[in-house]
Amino acid sequence: MNMADRIQYLRKTKGLSQEELANKVGVSRQAVSKWESGQSTPDIEKIIIMSELFEVTTDYILKGVEPVNMVNKETINSLYIGFAVIFGTIAGIWSFTANRFRIEECCFIVIAGALIGCAIALVVQVMYNLIIKK
């Protein structure tokens, strides 16, 4: 895929028309049409604007190179939510069982509680990905 194809792919993925992309980048619709047909290439300022608009790197637009270890904010936020649910569940089960049962019985209950906590965290994570991140 060349740069012209990548620009067209990114534009269509965002659901923008050539006119809308042109307005956002500050060029004419004909300029976008020429970029997408390979008749011309955008200058560096326009590539930077498009990289921010499409949420990709300039390397991706220019060369098709995608960063390997790039972690976005949404991934980090969803991990925080998952860990908070896991640790909150484990802490709640631990305090409940420590006050309710003898210490010998706590080991099994805490392990079961940790597994339940992980299951709950997984459900929350899936729901977060399906509902919130749409």
Image (cartoon, rainbow, N blue to C red):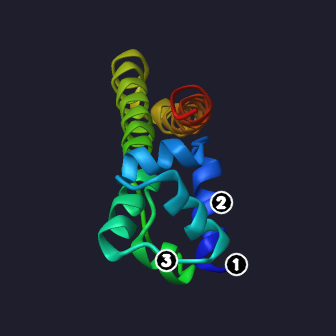
Residue 15 in the image, given as x and y percentages of width and height: 61, 41
**Can residue 68 be seen from the camera position used here?**
no
Above/below status of 10 relative to 13: below
Q: CA distance from mark 3 to mark 2?
A: 15 Å
Type of amino acid under label 2: Tyr
Residue 8 in the image, given as x and y percentages of width and height: 63, 60
Above/below status of 107 relative to 66: above
Q: Residue at x 50, y 73 (%)?
A: 61
Q: Residue at x 43, y 56 (%)?
A: 55
Looking at the rendering, which quadrant does residue 45 occupy? bottom left
Disc 3 versus disc 2: nearer the observer: 3
Residue that numbered label 2 is attached to: 9
Residue 66 in the image, given as x and y percentages of width and height: 53, 75
Residue that numbered label 3 is attached to: 41
Between 13 and 117, the one lying in front of the other is 13
Dot 3 alpha-carbon crowd within 10 angstroms: few under 14, some 14 to 19, many 20 or more: some
At mark 3, the secondary structure is loop
Q: Are marks 2 and 1 in contact (CB under 8 Å)?
A: yes
**Residue 1, numbered label:** 1
